Image: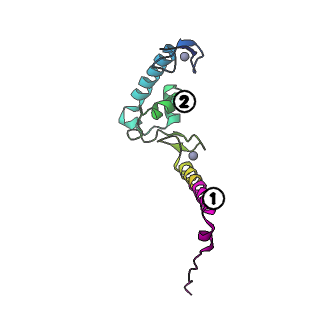
Amino acid sequence: MGELMNCPRCDALFVSGVRSICQDCYKEEERAYTTVYNYLRPRKNRQATIPEIVEATGVDEEIIYKFIKEKRLRPSQFPNLTYPCDRCGTMISDGNLCNNCLTEMQADLDEQRKLDEIARRNQQNVQEANTYYTVEKKQ
Ligand SMILES: [Zn+2]
Ligand SMILES: [Zn+2]
């Protein structure tokens, strides 16, 4: 079952279980969620950005990011709810990385795969290495 640990938010000792934060912080987060949600609900506030929400509700932006990552606040409903990419800090509304970082990481992976492939081929028999093809250039 649960074991005693320090709450990552307020450092209080609590018994960990379903929640990763203590009861007090949990209650506080729920209150923050209700505050933020009530603020966003009217049509005129749906386009609000995080700084505007922080300003209007006094809720910490980290907590709002958490709600978005947990999909409790959906960018499909509130289009300007964005949070920073884990890698470069660009504002995003889905996943943990922005498109650029995703592309870059994919490119790194592809590069690594190519190098692996070359190393693998080099180890293949020498006969194959002696065969090469020339491509006729169109003038
Ligand atoms: Zn706590
Ligand atoms: Zn990024």
What amino acid is at disc 1? Ala
Q: Quadrant of ligand 1?
A: top right
Please give left or right for residue 31 compared with residue 6 in the image. Answer: left
Badge 1 or badge 2: first in the primary sequence: 2
Please give left or right for residue 118 compared with residue 64 in the image. Answer: right
Please give left or right for residue 116 compared with residue 27 in the image. Answer: right
Give the residue at x 56% y 49%: 101
What is the CA distance from the residue labelled 1 to the residue labelled 2? 45 Å
Classify 1 as above or below 96: above
Give the residue at x 47% y 23%: 32
Other-residue count near label 1 (Cα within 10 Å), few / some / many at <14 / 14–19 / ≥20: few
Q: Is residue 121 within the magenta segment?
A: yes
Q: Out of 6 and 74, give the one closest to the viewer.
A: 6
Give the residue at x 60% y 58%: 120
Q: Position of residue 60 (x, y in %)?
A: 54, 27
Instruction: Write down the region rendered in magenta.
Output: 110-139
Q: Position of residue 50 (x, y in %)?
A: 50, 35
**Dot 1: element:** helix
Q: Out of 6 and 53, give the one closest to the viewer.
A: 6
Q: Is residue 15 within the magenta segment?
A: no
Q: Which residue is mark 2?
A: 62
Q: Which residue is mark 1?
A: 119
